[in-house]
Image (cartoon, rainbow, N blue to C red):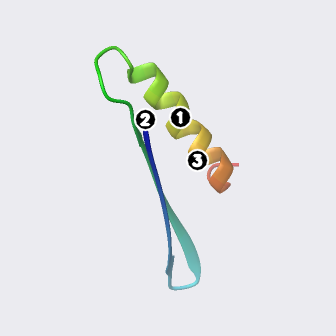
Amino acid sequence: MTLSLSIEAVDDRVVVHASAAVPGEGNAEQCLRARTALWRRAGVGS
């Protein structure tokens, strides 16, 4: 599994880019869970 998180400052706010990739077929749900966890850890959408 590959997890990626980048944070950048844009004007007066912080923009967080998060993505997760799971190689192989049938892992879309796993990928979505990993991405959701990344967003939560980054404080996005909370």
Q: What residue type is labelled 3?
A: Trp
Q: In the image, which disc is placed on residue 1?
A: 2
Of badges 2 and 1, nearer the viewer stands 2
Q: Which of 9 and 38 is in front in this view?
A: 38
Q: What element carries label 1?
A: helix
Q: Where is residue 36 in the image (x, y as percent from the top left)?
A: 56, 37
> Measured along the vertical axis of the image, is residue 32 above or below residue 38?
above
Q: How crowded is mark 2: few (under 14 residues within 10 Å), some or many (20 or more)?
A: few
> Measured along the vertical axis of the image, is residue 7 above or below residue 5?
below
Residue ranking furthest to the top: 26
Q: Quadrant of residue 29?
A: top left
The residue located at (54%, 29%) in the rendering is 33
Residue behind mark 3: 39
Q: Is mark 3 on a helix, strand or loop?
A: helix
Q: Which of marks 2 and 3 is nearer the N terminus?
A: 2
Q: In the image, which disc is placed on residue 34?
A: 1
Q: Residues within 10 Å of mark 3 (few under 14, many from 20)?
A: some
Residues at circles 2 and 1 in contact by the CB criterion of under 8 Å: yes
Q: Which of marks 2 and 1 is nearer the N terminus?
A: 2
The residue located at (32%, 29%) in the rendering is 23
The residue located at (57%, 73%) in the rendering is 14
- Marks 2/1: CA–CA distance: 9 Å
Q: In the image, which disc is placed on residue 2?
A: none
Count of labels in the image = 3
Q: Which amino acid does label 2 sit on?
A: Met
